[in-house]
Amino acid sequence: MPIFADFDRRNYRTVDVAIGYDGWAPTYDQTVMDDMDLALLNRLRRPDWERVRRAADLGCGTGRTGHWLRERGVAHIDGVDLSEGMLSVARDRGAHTTLSHADVRDSGLPSGTYDLVICSLIDEHLPDLTPLYAEARRLAAPGGAFVLVSYHPQFLMVTGMPTHYTGESGEPLAIDTHLHMFSEHVTAGNDAGWRLEEAAEALVEEAWLAAKPKWKDLLGHPFSMALAWTLPAA
């Protein structure tokens, strides 16, 4: 499989996930647009959001996804993240029932209790997708769903752009980034017992250019994708 280092055009100094997101936390919500991830969730027909009562939000970040779920009536949302800085912002947002400092591959959340497991824009920080899909499977109740929003591999390959932010000194810093092909998701999901129900993709649109004018040459290119998986009912 291709590796991101072969496409990296920025060659920024790289920091690990916890350090990077602690540094990015104060400005994250001003950098990431809803069109990149939440708009994809709005397009998914599955799961039936109105039937979701308990959700596990893996890599919950500043609580953007949790807030989106709360607006759709999800009553109980447990979030985990490696970054204390991101968790602090999420606590202020107040969408989650509980928030914990934990790795998405070993969340410490209770097994088999969630109607929905969800993660958004985190899998590029994992060298291997298998543990993520396995942990989602452990957490999900029979008939439960796993929704994953990911950077599109084509975007990473075409732009050579790692996940990055601007540090306090003004230096651009990359957060450890990995490239995952669609086939890797399919393999990891199938191996964990998930069934792929739906996929959606977000393309860079004209409306994005007001916030991201340097992306003009990327107009029409895929930026992100959402995969909706389900488990058989008991």
Image: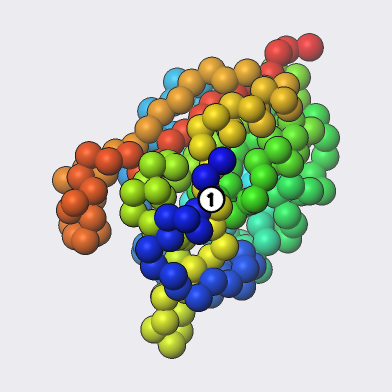
The N terminus lies in quadrant? top right
Whether residue 48 appears in this view of the structure is: no
Q: Quadrant of residue 131?
A: top right
* Label 1 sits on residue: 3
- From the viewer's perspective, is 175 left or right of 101? left
Which quadrant would the C terminus be assigned to in this image?
top right
Question: What's the amino acid at mark 1?
Answer: Ile
Place of residue 53 in the rendered image (x, y in percent of width and height, measured from the top left)? 64, 30
Using the image, determine if residue 107 lies above or below residue 174.
above
Callout 1: 10 Å neighbours few (<14), some, many (20+)? some
Q: How is the protein colored in the picture?
A: rainbow
Q: Position of residue 117 (x, y in %)?
A: 65, 35
Image-quadrant location for residue 223? top left
x%, y% of residue 137?
74, 30
User: In terms of secondary structure, where does tag 1 sit?
Assistant: loop
Q: Nearer the viewer, residue 190 or 114?
A: 190
**Left or right of 139, for residue 145:** left
Residue at 67 percent of width and 23 percent of height: 190
Figure check: 198 above or below 109: above
Q: Residue 45 or 192: which is nearer the viewer?
A: 192
Where does residue 100 sit, x and y in percent of width and height?
Answer: 73, 57
Residue at 33% x, 39% y is: 222
